[in-house]
Image: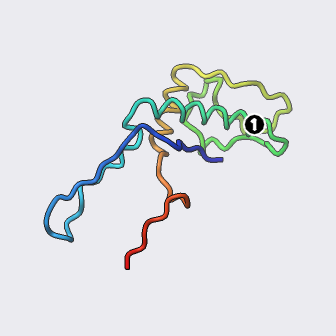
Amino acid sequence: MAQSLQYPFSRGSIHITSSDINSPPDFDTGFLSHPADLAPQVWTYKTMREIMRRMPSFRGEIAATHPQFPRESMAACISSYTPFVKDVVYSDKDNEAIEQWVRSKVETAWHSSWVPTQRR
């Protein structure tokens, strides 16, 4: 599963740095530069995790694909199937781990709703 913000508040920038066409531009993606964009990403991670844990095909979590929760955390990944799934209770440290994970994983993707104009 993947999560995305369709209308983020964060904005990047691109600026010309030279009259030389081969000179790279000053480019800043601006990912998560607005604080309002982080909370929905954290909420979506938690919600998707709860959905996946309740699917009939669920057989455990792969810790490498999740934030690094402290071992003693109630949010630590479970590596085997259990028929009785309860909601994960996240601590402040768990939330910080999710925020760090989101920041390290955020990226962009081309989307078919945006089609550039062809040059002639």
72 sits left or right of 19 in the view = right
Q: Which residue is mark 1?
A: 53
Determine the residue located farthest toward the bottom in the rendered image. Answer: 120
**Scheme by which the image is coloured:** rainbow
Residue 78 location, x and y as percent? 71, 35
Q: Please report the residue visible at 48 percent of the width from the left and 45 percent of the height from the top.
A: 106
63 sits left or right of 5 in the view = right
Quarter the C terminus occupies: bottom left
Report helix, strand or loop for mark 1: helix
Q: Of the residues shown, which amino acid type is indicated by label 1? A: Arg
Near mark 1 (Cα within 10 A), the count class, few <14, some 14-19 or many ≥20, is many
Query: What is the number of callouts on the image?
Result: 1
Q: Nearer the viewer, residue 48 or 96?
A: 48
- Residue 89 versus residue 82 in the image, above or below: above
User: Based on the displayed image, in which of its 4 quarters is residue 60 positioned?
Assistant: top right
User: Based on the displayed image, in which of its 4 quarters is residue 119 positioned?
Assistant: bottom left
Q: Nearer the viewer, residue 43 or 120?
A: 120
Q: Nearer the viewer, residue 25 or 55?
A: 25
81 sits left or right of 94 in the view = right
- Residue 110 versus residue 61 in the image, above or below: below
Residue 66 location, x and y as percent? 59, 40
Q: Please report the residue visible at 75 percent of the width from the left and 36 percent of the height from the top.
A: 53
Residue 84 location, x and y as percent? 84, 28
Q: Nearer the viewer, residue 22 or 99?
A: 22
Q: Please report the residue visible at 77 percent of the width from the left and 39 percent of the height from the top.
A: 80
Determine the residue located farthest toward the left in the rendered image. Answer: 19
